[in-house]
Amino acid sequence: MNNISTNNIYKSFKHNEEDMLVLEDINISINHGDKVAITGESGAGKSTLLQILAGLDSPSNGIIKFGNQEANLLSSIEKSNLRLHSFGFVYQFHHLLEDLTVFENVLLPQELMPSYKYSDASKKVNDLLGQLGLKSRANFLPWKLSGGEKQRVAIARAIINNPQFLFLDEPTGNLDIKNANLVQDLIIQIADEYKVALILSTHDNSFAQRMDKIYKISNRNIIEV
Ligand SMILES: Nc1ncnc2c1ncn2[C@@H]1O[C@H](COP(=O)(O)OP(=O)(O)OP(=O)(O)O)[C@@H](O)[C@H]1O
Ligand SMILES: [Mg+2]
């Protein structure tokens, strides 16, 4: 699967019985290997669009295609499989499972793979944790980690299954400048090394500038800037 494209996508949410339109006529195409930033004011619809592009939510109208498959024609199992194998998602607030250690959080997506073997998977997890500077944190529960460490664990969990597309929703929005820079460098390094496309939302202009393309959502539309 090497392309995600949308065709005249609309998204509205019901609020007090009324439809509130958030995205209108969105047309965007992202190829494997692209690095794309999505910017826009708070409330513009960045998270909403990322969730749709990652198959976590559906548009109210319009078509989204994963490769040459229309998303609305996929069964929920087919969609889950696509997300498991092809997509990684890093949430703004990391969403680590608090009862699992760092190692177990990162292992989890591997355990869902049909080809799962503990010995191979645990080596992979340990290698990745080492690469992300988290080796000494492998047995920590998430509450013991700093914000930057949590975000690095969330990145590890998102890429452990070697996805083609990595979505990151304001991945450094809650970090101080030093940690934000470190995590930003890491994200770009990982994208290049693992040949994974980046689709990220950010309020940080200098981070957006490091992507190949910058889009802005404004008045429910998307424009390339
Ligand atoms: N599940 C939902 N139900 C109702 N309204 C929603 C839902 N999700 C988002 N919205 C509304 O859609 C609009 C866009 O929200 P979204 O979270 O996509 O914005 P954003 O650009 O990511 O903002 P931020 O930069 O603050 O994260 C907001 O007005 C929000 O209240
Ligand atoms: Mg958001």
Image (tube, grey):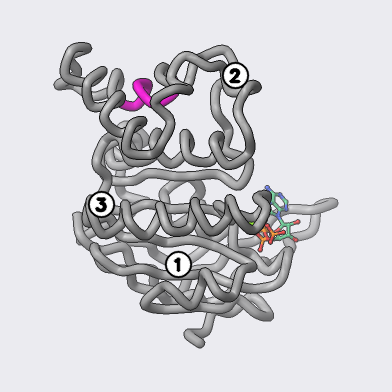
Amino acid bearing label 2: Glu
Label 1's element?
Answer: strand
Mark 3–mark 1 distance (CA, rounded to whole Å): 24 Å
Say if 8 sits above or below 113 in the image.
below
Amino acid bearing label 3: Gln
Res. 198 image quadrant:
bottom left
Indicate if the residue with disc 3 has its beta carbon within 8 Å of ligand 2: no
Give me the residue at 57% from left, 12% from top.
99
Is there CB contact under 8 Å for labels 2 and 1? no
Horizontally, residue 14 falls left or right of residue 208, namely: right
Residue 59 seen in this snapshot: no
Q: Estimate the x, y position of residue 157 in percent, counting from the top left.
A: 40, 33
Mark 2–mark 1 distance (CA, rounded to whole Å): 37 Å
Q: Estimate the x, y position of residue 107 in percent, counting from the top left.
A: 34, 21
Tell me the magenta residue range.
105-109
Horizontally, residue 22 falls left or right of residue 192, namely: right
Give me the residue at 69% from left, 55% from top.
13
The residue identified by callout 3 is 164
Indicate if the residue with disc 1 has its beta carbon within 8 Å of ligand 1: no
Q: Nearer the viewer, mark 3 or mark 1?
A: 3
The residue identified by callout 1 is 62
Which quarter of the rendered image does ligand 1 occupy? bottom right
Q: Nearer the viewer, mark 3 or mark 2?
A: 2
Q: Nearer the viewer, mark 2 or mark 1?
A: 2
Q: Residues within 10 Å of mark 3 (few under 14, many from 20)?
A: many
Label 2's element?
Answer: loop
**Mark 3 vs mark 2: which is more N-terminal?**
2
**Mark 3 vs mark 1: which is more N-terminal?**
1
**Mark 2 vs mark 1: which is more N-terminal?**
1
